[in-house]
Amino acid sequence: MAAVPRRIALIVNPVAGGGRADRVLRDARAALEARGLASRVARTTSLEHARSLAREAAAAGEVAAALGGDGLVGAVAGALRGGDGVLGVVPGGRGNDFARVVGIPVDPAGAVEVLATGVERPVDLAEVDGRGFLCIASCGFDSDANRIANEAKLVRGNLVYLYAALRALAAWHPATFELDVDGRRETVRGYTVAAANSKAYGGGMFVAPDAELDDGLLDIVTIADVRRLRFLAQLPKVFSGRHVANPEVTVRRGREVRISADRPFTVFADGDPIAELPATVRALPGAVRAILPR
């Protein structure tokens, strides 16, 4: 018996990627129509609204397909956790790191092809104080860089992350972080703490190159204090993941990490603010079913 074609609810953030999502939507709908897939469009007004739309799609037996950036993908995934809903992804943001890691094409026709022919697989979700995300939550230097990137108006595309990093570095002062990883406590003074469910963030920065979406664990990456010039010189290595060989970089693995610091920081997950320190990040093994390439 032939499989019943999937019905798709396109949950769209119309301002993602500086307006790119609206252009992607047009091409995605054309590709869905050419494929003979029934679809409807649900436009979001906020991440909380996106979560509500995802739950509605799941209740209607539709694939909740997030068309936007990684923040939207994580919000939709968080709304579907532990239920019968299915996550789909049509990249429409600046970074699109979840799609990059799992092999979903950035072009709308290719992404729709995955929606039509891909396989449903369980993937890990992570949460910060109860709010779900799919890729990486981080704080410290990353808090400043994310804020700058989100406020940037003139710099577009992936270049915004490099611009934000340079701006943040100019004003950075080391912070002291207290970590509790599955009951193991330690202190780190330096730049960043990242709790990685997946490998990449920031438009192709492989900060946790060995992280896996199906191992039930977080890769917790810290960057200790080094001179700014060394930090800047080593920054390009993060695009290949080679930075983890540096002595100032440490990777731990655990199911849960509690993070506090000697000054206030906002925790950002996949480009969006998600919590304030102190905060606890947990891995939720196999919590979401996603349509991935075969």
Image (tube, helix red, strand yellow):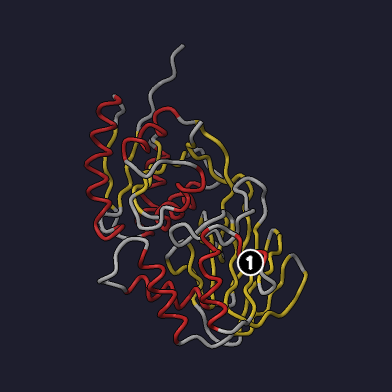
Quadrant of the rendered image containing residue 218: bottom right
Q: Is residue 89 left or right of residue 192?
A: left
For mark 1, what is the residue? 221
Q: Residue furthest right?
A: 184
How far across and how far down the image is residue 36, in percent?
Answer: 29, 24
Vertical placement of residue 99 versus 267, above or below:
above
Of the residues shown, which amino acid type is indicated by label 1? Val
How far across and how far down the image is residue 199, in percent?
Answer: 56, 55
How far across and how far down the image is residue 80, in percent?
Answer: 48, 46
How far across and how far down the image is residue 201, in percent?
Answer: 49, 60
Vertical placement of residue 178 versus 14, above or below:
below
Q: Secondary structure at mark 1?
A: strand
Quadrant of the rendered image containing residue 108: top left
Depth check, front residue: 9 or 103:
103
Residue located 32% across and 35% down the image: 109
Q: Is residue 59 left or right of residue 109?
A: right
Depth check, front residue: 51 or 114:
114
Q: Is residue 229 left or right of residue 73?
A: right
Graded by Cα atoms within 10 Å as few (under 14), some (14 to 19) or many (20 or more), the crowding at tag 1 reads: many
